[in-house]
Amino acid sequence: MLEGASDGSSMTYKDEDRVLIKLSFEEFVKQDYGNSLNSLNKLEASIGSSPKISHNKAVVEYYLNDLQKHDQFRKSLQQLTGSTDFPAGFEIKDVKMCAAYYNQALLLHHFRQPQQALKIMTAVLNVLNHANHLDENFIQRAYLLTLTMLLDTNQPRKAKALLEQLENRLGITREAIINDDDEVVAAVAATEEISLTPKDKDKNLDDFREMLKLCTIRVNLANGKSTLLPSEDTSEFSIAKGHQYYLGNDFQMAARELSKKFTNESFTLAVNGEDQNTIIANNMGLIHFAVRHYAMAHALNFDKNANEEVAQKFSKGLPLHAVGGSKQTQILYNLGVALLHLQRPKEAFECLIVPLNYHHNNPRLWLRIAEACIMLYRQDIKQNENKNLVSSVVGPNLEFAVLCLRNAYTLVEHFLAQRKMEEDKQPDADLNVEWDKMREGIATHPSKPLKDGAFQQLRCSILAAFSYVLVTLGDYTLSLKYGKELLKIPNLPDTLKMLGHLYCAESLIMLNKVPEAISYLDPKFLSELRGEDFETRASPDWNVNSLEAAQSIITYNLAVSLVMKGDAPEVAKSVLLSCTHPIVMNHVKMLKLYMELQAGNVENCRKMIRVDTPQFI
């Protein structure tokens, strides 16, 4: 963005210099970048070099090169601001440098460094809110860019608070913005820069109103607020309506909105920085996913075609608006989750490993990758494939699952400690808090932040998976540790409570602590289990989908422990009488056979084999 003549500077100019300032700005607005640069060079020769002139020259040169020489522009901005890294609490000390910092944030935003960009824009807005005589058009752009970045990084509460701040500044309401009220026109028009021509003012006004309207709708949707949307059949508003229907679980109407014939021309990656077909295909895939029809790959093809098309059109380099326009990361994340539901873990692993390059602080993503590894291992067991596990190669094996779960566990513990510190500092988190201090849920980008309940569920799932993988790989001490930690969590679902008891018991048995293992398989524990949890919470593909199945598994393992203890064979036999569910019948028969052999009853063993497997007699 180019700085106009109104920057709050106290410097006085000669009349001919003022003419050059105005001329360079007007030429820039007319997209006559060559003459605009010449005017700036003349101005610099007249009054000498200044940060503002250097910044404007860098912007004009960037436009002169079709917004393609990103490194050159980045270096120019870094020289002006003197900043390449932006720590927490970063502040801007010179108000005149706000435009340069804004452009630096814009570059970072397009190059997928949103957290750094947000630190800059937070500092920019803090300065703008306390400065006078600044270009109001620039302030509006700064608000819109920050809102967009907050929405793109799934921070809806901060976006809502910032939008309210902008509404107060403009003196308008959210409903007026969405419904094109004349109040918005008057409020925004009153802030327009006087150096623009009437035609340019109208264009700026229309652009700002449209962007503000879309941002407002996105903020409402991100916060789960139902909104009466405009009746326009443009693709942007139809996508927003489809999103609103989707949030209301009206999937048929959501699909119908996305299938409309739109009144506007399709937006493309080459022109607009986003591809309409890709977004609609992805959203349609999510609608199908919600009704258990998994079809995500179509969006990936559209994204690939859009990127190939833009690469051919701009062979010398992508312009800024097309940089980072690919939706591959988000689509592969969605596709990976869908493939997990389809019981295709190898393909799911290959999809999910790509988003990991960008979202390695997402504990849920690490868990999903570990689940793919576990699922593939389980499938290999069922198919009796003796597959060699190579721990030195990144692949869908249990060793890599351990790495994923360790990272997920570490992140979860970090977020827990961070949340506790925030609660200690801000007991009343929602009262009189600035927008940038507003508390969001636990960040799991590219998906929405997790609320407390969902975060606890994630923690439980990580601990259960970690304990299972470790006991499978023979690390019984750590498996026992995480199993015990799982059982300490209050209000633990019965499905996970059962798994926690089983993993702890198995770990103790393998550590030759059978009496302690039996305590985890106590029949009293069975009376605490409820059937609803196994019917509603369990995966459709998990065999333990009833209370009877869970009780039979626990009881069978208790019988095994008693047999291993060696001093209660009759008790073990009586315990086995209650194991009637088909899920354990084959195991029960083998255990009974073992007990008869141990007792020396060979004839009974022959009878059992004759009844169950006559082909081996």
Image: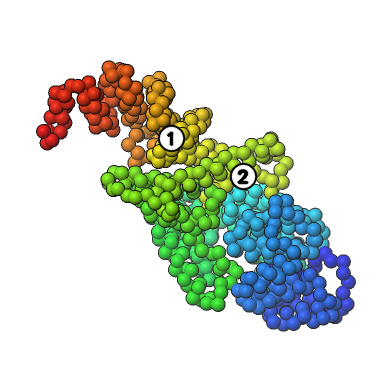
Q: Position of residue 471 (x, y in %)?
A: 41, 37
Q: Residue at x 49, y 76 (%)?
A: 312
Label 1, label 2: how many angstroms apart (C-alpha)? 37 Å
- The dot on residue 440 is 2
In the rendered structure, which disc, 1 or 2, sits on the residue that comes first in sequence?
Answer: 2
Image vertical order of residue 177 relative to residue 274, above or below: above
Q: Identity of the amino acid at label 1?
A: Tyr
Q: Residues within 10 Å of mark 2 (few under 14, many from 20)?
A: some
Q: Residues within 10 Å of mark 1 (few under 14, many from 20)?
A: many
Q: Position of residue 592 (x, y in %)?
A: 23, 25
Tell which of 11 and 352 is nearer to you: 352
- Quarter that holds the C terminus: top left
Q: Residue at x 46, y 34 (%)?
A: 477
Instruction: Point out the frontmost of discs 1 and 2.
Output: 1
Direction from residue 227 to residue 14 in the image, left or right: right
Q: Identity of the amino acid at label 2?
A: Glu
Indicate the secondary structure of the residue bearing disc 2. Answer: loop
Image vertical order of residue 573 relative to residue 135, above or below: above
- The dot on residue 489 is none
Q: Position of residue 258 (x, y in %)?
A: 45, 58
Residue 616, image quadrant: top left
Residue 125, image quadrant: bottom right
Query: Mark 2 and mark 1 in contact (Cβ < 8 Å)?
Result: no
Q: Residue at x 73, y 51 (%)?
A: 89
Q: Position of residue 127 (x, y in %)?
A: 77, 56
Tell which of 177 and 21 is nearer to you: 21
- Quarter that holds the N terminus: bottom right
Image vertical order of residue 55 relative to residue 298, above or below: below
Q: Which residue in the structure is indicated by mark 1? A: 476
Indicate the secondary structure of the residue bearing disc 1. Answer: helix
Tell which of 224 and 181 is nearer to you: 224
